[in-house]
């Protein structure tokens, strides 16, 4: 009999440990004889190290070693070449880690790093993305494995024949993840065994990477990530800190703690690539789309290709008989971009949902109604029906809750003193994914249960959601269930990313619980342990899964100072269709967090690259501006009662990222409605508004 734990608003299991400071993060575990590492970044953009002088550093009190390409232990080649750190003198970008200083204290390590002298032979560099860069090329695929380009019908002919057309280009800058806990690791070697406590979104992939790089059998590596202070994609796989710490610990034969500084997080651990996006939309006079084209340009590094799937959002969001999407990439002398919350969908939605707003104005139709008219039950990209698609329901309920009815569509139609008032809307979608995971369920003699899975809680409340799912699957009160996660010695599981964590982990937990209950019913011993693996492919009979997405609609009201161009958010409201919600408390937190990040993207965030030095000049939280509490006066998140049983046994779609998708476009559309000024290059700063039009 189900206890009904799923769907109830339980507080986070680890809440007391976090607020009392007893929760241990990567560099907080007690370790005997621990030393401290400090990474040394390259001071040039492109070139080759010709000399490393460590004399002064090694003479500094407390310094034990300076590890660099000349003395570091050798690592095996692998699929992530940027992780083969300290193996060669080549410099690919400014800020690349070229040495690590190990000392008996953090202060001594930092001082030692300052005293390392490095000479370089430099080469000319290219660091700025343009849509006419001579190095632009077509990648074989875009992240994670989508086709680079798609085409259906005849876009050029369809576009030329349409009575209403929009042809606009949008630009987004580089964005930086900036989790509260930086990338950090404690590494220690014992008798050829490597143990790391790492700040990661997935101990399973980090475990595999370390075993490969250091040529160790899997059983000789253990990765622990019990508590992680955020990641937002940047900690999706092994990154520099874990490799540097492991190299340094092997070199000095002592445990090493290494936490990257805030400044060192701007680039080398990943960031969202800048984008240049041209969107062309054509429609009939009733506002029905007849042609859609989305061309996206982004950057990657010279070390490894990462092609953000920026235009993929457009392939499935709205229907049209003539469609085309393209991606082009350029290799620059910069760090490799990587995942940032809702990679591809987030910047892609900003461009498409802004262009849809411009189309609504051009055709003279309410932007909510225009989106409803272009809804589709069949995926335009795959030609197959969606498992569920409730974007229209999100738009309608959101419009009702927000008070959209009666909105005057004319820009600058509302004013309160010196403030111009405007409202905007945008749709949202994000893929609903599952990945294979495994879990173990154990029945104890005292009537309690232990469920173990190598899931990761990066601050989302995942531990609590798994606990709730396990209780219902076992048919017992949740108080009788203990959850263990975040350790590579536990059953392997998908990483916490792509909004697929709870969906994937709950599948495995339910399988393990079901198998355990069957054994107990068959008269098994009082202590029983069952491991079950959820391989998501078997649930669709070997056939490709039907298109599956979470959806949303976001509504924003802004005010803009007519004298200064200052933009303030009055209110923000989102309605989402994200499958079954396991825990309303943590779900609402995730959705509000995502929406706030979208607001931050629209109004504040911008990585400013100095082309001369190939580095971001605003590389701390004093100069890289993000949304704060004062910027969000009212923000509300709601969801539909949706259960999609074709996804997984729990009916979960995942909602970590849907909140940010579309949010920036809703803000930008509201600013245009308030001012009549369309800003197509984020962020929407006051100087851009004042510079384009006299608001007063």
Image (cartoon, rainbow, N blue to C red):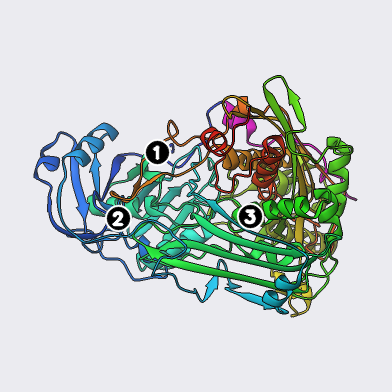
* SS label for mark 3: helix
Q: Distance between the residues labelled 2 and 3?
A: 43 Å
* SS label for mark 1: loop
Q: In this view, does 201 lie above or below 12?
A: below
In front of the other: 114 or 616: 616
Q: Name the residue under label 1.
A: 618
Give the dominant element type of the magenta stretch: helix, strand or loop.
loop
Q: Residue furthest top?
A: 417
Q: Name the residue under label 2.
A: 247
Q: Position of residue 343 (x, y in %)?
A: 58, 56
Quarter of the figure with residue 551: bottom right
Q: Distance between the residues labelled 2 and 1?
A: 30 Å
Report if residue 268 lies within the magenta region: no
Q: Mark 3 points at which residue?
A: 351
Q: Identify the residue at horizontal 30%, vertical 66% (top origin).
A: 75
Residue range highlighted in magenta = 1-19
């Amino acid at each position: 009999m189900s206890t009904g734990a799923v769907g109830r608003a339980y507080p986070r299991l680890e809440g007391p440990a976090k607020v009392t400071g007893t929760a241990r993060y990567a560099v907080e575990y007690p370790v005997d004889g621990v030393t401290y590492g400090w990474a040394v970044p390259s001071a040039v953009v492109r070139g080759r190290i010709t000399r490393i002088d460590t004399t002064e550093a090694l003479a500094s009190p407390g310094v034990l070693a300076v590890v660099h390409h000349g003395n570091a232990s050798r690592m095996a080649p692998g699929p992530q070449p940027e992780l083969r750190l300290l193996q060669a003198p080549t410099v690919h970008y400014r800020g690349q880690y070229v040495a690590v200083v190990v000392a008996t204290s953090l202060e001594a390590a930092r001082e030692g790093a300052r005293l390392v002298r490095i000479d370089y032979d430099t080469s000319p560099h290219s660091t700025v993305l343009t849509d006419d860069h001579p190095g632009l090329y077509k990648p074989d695929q875009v992240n994670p494995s989508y086709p680079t380009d798609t085409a259906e019908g005849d876009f050029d002919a369809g576009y030329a024949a349409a009575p209403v057309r929009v042809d606009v280009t949008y630009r987004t800058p580089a964005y930086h993840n900036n989790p509260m806990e930086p990338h950090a690791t404690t590494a220690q070697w014992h008798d050829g065994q490597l143990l790391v406590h790492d700040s990661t979104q997935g101990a399973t992939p980090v475990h595999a990477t370390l075993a490969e790089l250091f040529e160790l059998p899997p059983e000789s590596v253990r990765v622990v990530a019990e508590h992680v202070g955020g990641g937002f994609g940047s900690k999706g796989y092994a990154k520099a800190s874990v490799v540097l710490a492991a190299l340094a610990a092997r070199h000095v034969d002592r445990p090493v703690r290494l936490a990257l500084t805030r400044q060192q997080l701007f680039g080398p651990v990943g960031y969202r690539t800048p984008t240049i996006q041209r969107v062309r939309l054509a429609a009939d006079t009733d506002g029905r789309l007849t042609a859609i084209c989305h061309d996206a340009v982004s950057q990657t590094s010279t070390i490894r290709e990462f092609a953000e799937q920026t235009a993929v959002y457009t392939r499935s969001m709205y229907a049209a008989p003539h469609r085309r999407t393209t991606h082009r990439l350029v290799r620059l002398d910069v760090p490799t971009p990587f995942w940032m919350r809702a990679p591809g969908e987030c910047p892609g939605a900003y461009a498409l949902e802004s262009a849809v707003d411009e189309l609504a104005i051009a055709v003279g139709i309410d932007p909510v109604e225009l989106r409803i008219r272009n809804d589709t039950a069949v995926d335009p990209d795959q030609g197959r029906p969606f498992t569920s698609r409730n974007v229209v329901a999100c738009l309608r309920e959101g419009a009702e809750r927000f008070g959209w009815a009666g909105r005057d569509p004319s820009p600058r139609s509302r004013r309160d003193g010196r403030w111009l008032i405007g409202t905007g809307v945008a749709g949202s979608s994000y893929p609903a994914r599952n990945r294979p995971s495994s879990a173990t369920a154990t029945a104890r003699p005292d009537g309690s249960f232990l469920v173990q899975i190598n899931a990761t809680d990066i601050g989302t409340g995942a531990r609590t959601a798994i606990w709730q799912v396990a209780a219902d699957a076992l048919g017992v009160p949740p108080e009788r269930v203990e959850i263990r996660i975040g350790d590579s010695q536990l059953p392997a599981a998908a990483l916490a990313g792509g909004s697929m964590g709870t969906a994937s982990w709950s599948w495995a937990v339910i399988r393990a619980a079901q198998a355990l209950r069957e054994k107990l019913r068959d008269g098994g011993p009082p202590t029983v342990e069952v491991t079950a693996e959820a391989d998501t492919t078997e649930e669709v009979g070997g056939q490709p899964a039907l298109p599956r997405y979470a959806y949303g609609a976001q509504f924003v009201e802004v005010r803009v100072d007519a004298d200064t161009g200052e933009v303030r958010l009055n209110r923000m409201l989102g309605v989402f269709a994200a499958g079954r919600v396991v825990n309303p408390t943590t779900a609402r937190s995730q959705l509000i967090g995502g929406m706030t990040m979208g607001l931050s993207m629209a109004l504040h965030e911008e990585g400013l690259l100095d082309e001369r030095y190939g580095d971001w000049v605003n590389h701390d939280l004093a100069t890289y501006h993000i949304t704060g509490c004062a910027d969000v006066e009212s923000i509300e998140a709601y969801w539909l009662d949706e259960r999609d049983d074709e996804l997984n046994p729990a009916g979960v779609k995942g909602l970590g990222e849907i909140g940010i998708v579309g949010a920036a476009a809703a803000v930008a559309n509201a600013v245009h409605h308030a001012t009549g000024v369309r800003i197509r290059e984020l962020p929407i700063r006051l100087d851009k508004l004042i510079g384009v039009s006299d608001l007063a």
